[in-house]
Image (cartoon, rainbow, N blue to C red):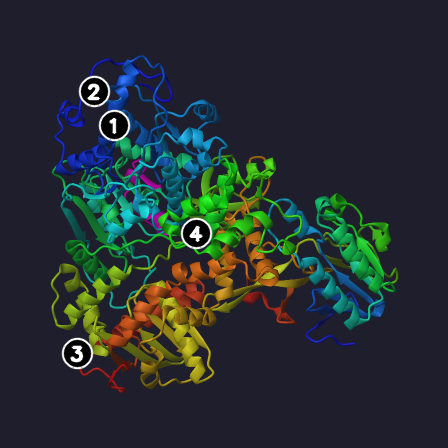
Amino acid sequence: MAVPGAHRLEAAGLSLWLLPGRAVWWPAAGTLFVADLHFGKAATFRRAGLAVPEGTTADNLARLTHLLGSTGAHQLVFLGDLLHARSGRGDALWRALGDWRGAHAAVRMVLVRGNHDRHAGDPPAALGVAMVEEPWAPLPSAPLLGCHHPHRVAGNLVLAGHLHPTVKVWGGARDSLRLPCFVHTDGQLLLPAFGAFTGSAPTRWPQDAQCFAIADERVLEVPAARRGV
Amino acid sequence: MTADGAPARSRAASPTPAQWMAARGWKPFAFQRKVWHALGAGRSGLLHATTGAGKTYAVWLGALARLAARRQDAAEAGADRAPPLTVLWLTPMRALAADTLRALMQPLPELAPTWTAGLRTGDTPSAQRGAQDRRLPTLLVTTPESLSLLLARADAHERLKSVRLVVVDEWHELMGNKRGVQAQLALARLSAWQPQLMVWGMSATLGNLEEALATLLPAPLLPRPDPVLVRGRVEKPMVVDVLLPARIERFAWAGHMGLSLLPQVVARLEAAATSLVFTNTRSQTERWYQALLEARPDWAGTLALHHGSLDAGVRTWVEAGLKAGTLRAVVCTSSLDLGVDFLPVEQVLQIGSPKGVARLLQRAGRSGHAPGRSARATLVPTHSLELLEAAAVRHAVAHGDIESRHTPRAPLDVLVQHLVTIALGGGFRPDELLAEVRRAPAYAELSDKAWQWALDFVRHGGDSLANYPDFRRVVPDEEGVWRMPDARLARRHRSNVGTIVSDAAMQVQYLKGTRLGSVEESFLTRLKPGDIFRFAGRLLALVRIENMTAWVRRAPAGAAALPRWNGGRLPISETLGHAMLEQLACAARGIYASPEMRCVRPLLALQAAWSALPTPGRLVAETLRTREGWHLFLYPFAGRVVHQGLAGLMAWRASHEMANTFSIAVNDYGLELLSARRIDWAALLPGMLGTEDTTVGALSEELLHSLNATEMARRRFRQIARVAGLIFQSHPGERRSNRQIQASASLYYDVFARYDPQNLLLAQARAELLSQELDATRLARTLAAMRAQTLTVCALERPTPLGLPLMVERFRERLSTENLGQRLLRMVQALEAAADGTAVPSAPPRANGRHKAAQ
């Protein structure tokens, strides 16, 4: 299958697609990876008296639906931080997630617990999301590990989230743009945060890291010379 | 009498202000008597004068005569307590508050023996604050932020209704920004509780003093005597002179740090006991401090530097040294602009462009406080074109052309913060509060729609409850009084009152522990461990960055990076830009009246020979073909901010004619557009300057389209989100860095833009972007002025003295410093050779002739 605007990445003998929808698609395993959704974050903020408009949860789910549809994935892996905080849990959220889950009953879903999940607690069992700890191997035969925290495991490609990577792209003449990105270094592939209400911190990526920015529904590699902090 | 203590009792009748002064051998000035008289009649007013002219005593002695004398009877009748809070004295800087209090306490034993006096700022220790919580002193010196905090107390009305007079010191510093708006809202509230409230402002000289007065005073609830505008003592004679280089460079550029006048600066410093050396940027401060020490190592210990990024301890030490006279000179930025009454020096030097007339006057006012001495500012140009600026600013000072300042109009973020403050401070009924808020001049024209939106924002989160489920911040109680019931939110609000937003900064600290100050993270995160940079007058090597702290150690000599702080890019004022064009007009007629104009003559003569001199009546455009492409240079002299907008606009308009991409460069004098494809600017320009009926509104729309407006508005949103209480600064004990707040501000911007695009805070960000960052009204005026000018288009063979600095600005974006230096050196050598070849002004190459711009 081909997703418009996607970038194919060959690593550790595997063939992966970096999708402009902030996800990694692994066709050989029929598996889609996303990281850092932070469901319930906006509700957490509102309960603390900070005005964040509604719509981010529905947005996240709609984009997931779109990705599942365009790839035909039969497994969806959340690389940590599915839920933002304990105070973000609530019936409205479970209802929205439950309805969405019901529409994708055939898809197996796995959550690799992240730091936020530990504090927020597991989602209700009724959602049918398998809980695992990092590092987690989707296919024992393939050298690919699903994680939340970036780290290296010799001989494997680690897919991780946690950092919410972005890259600043210089356009010249004082013009620059900060874009969410994938970062590929030896043995490690970082995913951008999927959540519609997630922030990021400016980071200087190593010279030898490959940065793939998401710009206008396309994944483009940003050479080190065009990157800023 | 003692601070915050029991009043010293005295039964003697109080002397009058004049008697009190006479006892010290002082004679009141006419303006002081005028202020006393006005205060005696219960009038409000604005007193403006240069610094050190006795403004404080004018207002303070008059206030005591009016407010303390009446209470004498009560005190003598045996009331055993000091009068309640009567005078609020607002000062813009915490650091000045203690000095102010000391000065104000002097006359109290004789003129108001029953009065107490105290200080309340963010620095006030909690024990002292606790004592004030039981009872406020009769005189309270405080800041706009601390006053807002008092208004957020549930018993605010009870404690503040007795205030009879509010004095706002350095009003010129506050009136143009949101802190001033905050003060206006507080004044509107105080005057509702005390309809006879008197308000006095003290200000340096501004171009629009009537407006400054009108902005200070809340609209009256009851008829009140007319306010007065009092001009202080005839200004100290002001001497502005210029250090002239022995020879000038015909090709010179801004930022080329220009230490060539160092020997002359050293000689000036030798000749005076105390000096202030003002620069425009913190990095320039570091550079000059270092250069002076290298020139005179024996001055170590008597030379200091002072800028806003240094640790408070360092700054306090420097200020104390200046006061005690142990320092010969301090190299400083605008961090020493204020507090002028307390740190007089013999002379003031200004390195580089003063940027504006009022700014130079303010700085010069730091010198010559002794009777009979003149205030003296010496301008030190850092490149040849600053000689022209110096001539212009000198002329403007002599003719009293001074810039104006204006209050922000109805900023919603400040209003939202105020609503929460008042909800905490006893609660409010919307109709009553609306009437009160509209009495603050900044909100006189607040629309019903904006008001309703602000109410909805604090109650529902947005204009519809459905969009913001679970949200609550301020809610009406059963009686319809809006309050903030959540103690946690109340605590957060109290620790975030204010409108000052600092850039994300990191502490710089020695490994062994001493703190040096803070530097913007954007600079530090670009350094690698081991990199050397100059800060706080020292060479430092970065060891590591950890927990928002840059750990450093002393570095041996080496090539050092200079931190580039934001904010060093203040544009020249409109007043100064006009004055420069006037000077050029004289030069165009062959009149070189001042020494600095004679000094810069070779540069101007070459400019005239190769191209033409811009004047108030002539807009000069230059076209040039190089290997890089097709250049257009244009010189409106409207300041870099306006030029940035103008260049974006022209590139946008030119792209309509023909698809093209442009590189843009700007400085304070002009702009450059570089395009890959040829453009017939001579034919295009008249049309591109637009038609006369272009409104500011239409222009604004076009500007927003032509620039990277979303990104700029997103950056602008940081302050708005902070003031409106969406993001907050760290509480003690919390590990929450400014960086996370910054990220959240742009995140807020994005979620609003996407899920609540009607949110008026977004509209405010765009409006502030246009009014403050792009200065759309000034841009519209500039365009109108350009249309009225005769357009002269010159086709060049090589860049002119005015054009080269713009090319340099553009290179700077792309090249490392080392490459830049070498490349520029080669260019300048080639240009100098060409200039020597055509030293005799020949007929300038004007292939395109002269064009009259379309009207």
Circle 2: residue type? Ser
Question: Contact (CB < 8 A) between labels 2 and 1?
Answer: yes
Say which of marks 4 and 2 sits in front: 2
- Mark 3: few/some/many CA within 10 Å (<14, 14-19, 20+): few
Q: Chain of mark 3?
A: B
- Say which residue appears at 12% left-offset and 66% top-offset: B592
| Left or right of B216 in this view: B424 | right
Q: Mark 2 highlights which residue? A: B14
**Looking at the picture, how far across and down is residue B747, in whole percent?**
59, 56
- If you read the primary sequence from the N terminus, does the residue marked by circle 2 or circle 1 appear first? 2
Instruction: Name above or below for residue B702 compared with residue A123.
Output: below
Q: Mark 4 highlights which residue? A: B563
Q: Mark 3 highlights which residue? A: B841
Q: In the structure shown, which secondary structural element does the residue marked by tag 3 occupy?
A: loop
Distance Cα–Cα, label 3 vs label 2: 76 Å
Same-subunit check for callouts 3 and 2: yes
Distance Cα–Cα, label 1 vs label 3: 69 Å
Viewer-side residue, B470 vs B291: B470
